[in-house]
Image (cartoon, rainbow, N blue to C red):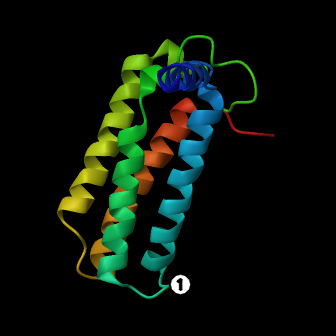
Amino acid sequence: MRKLVLAISMLALAGSAAFADPIQDRQALMKERGKIVGGLSKVAKGDQAFDAAAVLTQLQALQANAEKLDVDALFPKGSDAGNTTASPKIWEDMAGFKAAEDKYLADVKAAVAAAPADVDALKAQVGTIGSDCGTCHQAYRVKKG
C-alpha cells in the first residue's frame, strides 16, 4: 500500500512539472534576477553600505539564478504568445539570444570569481552586468505601453 501511495505521489509530481508554464517560470526567474541586481545597484550607488560578504552572497545568488535559466525549457516554440514581453526576435534569432545569455552568465561568474573588495570594484561589475541586461532587453524584449 505504501508503494502505491508513493507511486501515485510521484506521478502527480511529474504531471504537475509537465504542466509548468514557461512564461510564468521565466518571468519569476527574471523578477528574482531584477531584485538581486537592484540590491547590488543600491550598494554600488552608495544607497546601502558596502559589505564584501553580503555582496558576494548576492553575486552568488545571481549566478545561481543565471544558471537556472534554461533557454530551451523556458522559451519553447509557442511561448511567445500570451502575457509576455518576450520579443518574437528570440525565436527568430535563438542563437543570438542564447549567446547573450551565455555572455551574461560568464560575466556573473567572473564577478563571483573576482569578488569585489570595495565599492569601486562592485561598480565596474554592476556596470558590466547591467550592460548585459540592457543589451538583451533592447534586442529581445518588447517594451510595455
Which residue is denoted by mark 1 in the rendering? 47
Q: Residue furthest right?
A: 145
- Dot 1 crowding, Cα within 10 Å, few <14, some 14–19, many 20+: few
Could you say where residue 113 lies in the image, as x and y percent from the top left? 18, 60
Q: Residue at x 56, y 26 (%)?
A: 9
Residue 86 in sight from this viewpoint: no
- Figure quadrant of residue 23: top right
Q: Amino acid at mark 1?
A: Asp
SS assignment at label 1:
loop
Q: Residue at x 61, y 24 (%)?
A: 16
Side of 106 where 94 appears, left or right:
right
In the depicted structure, whether residue 78 falls above or below residue 137: above
Could you say where residue 114 lies in the image, as x and y percent from the top left? 18, 65
Q: Residue furthest front?
A: 1
In the depicted structure, whether residue 122 falls above or below residue 96: below
Side of 90 where 96 appears, left or right:
left
Q: Residue furthest bottom?
A: 49
Could you say where residue 134 lies in the image, as x and y percent from the top left? 50, 47
Could you say where residue 21 lies in the image, as x and y percent from the top left? 64, 26
Q: Nearer the viewer, residue 138 or 86?
A: 86
Q: Residue at x 35, y 56 (%)?
A: 128
- Figure quadrant of residue 111: bottom left
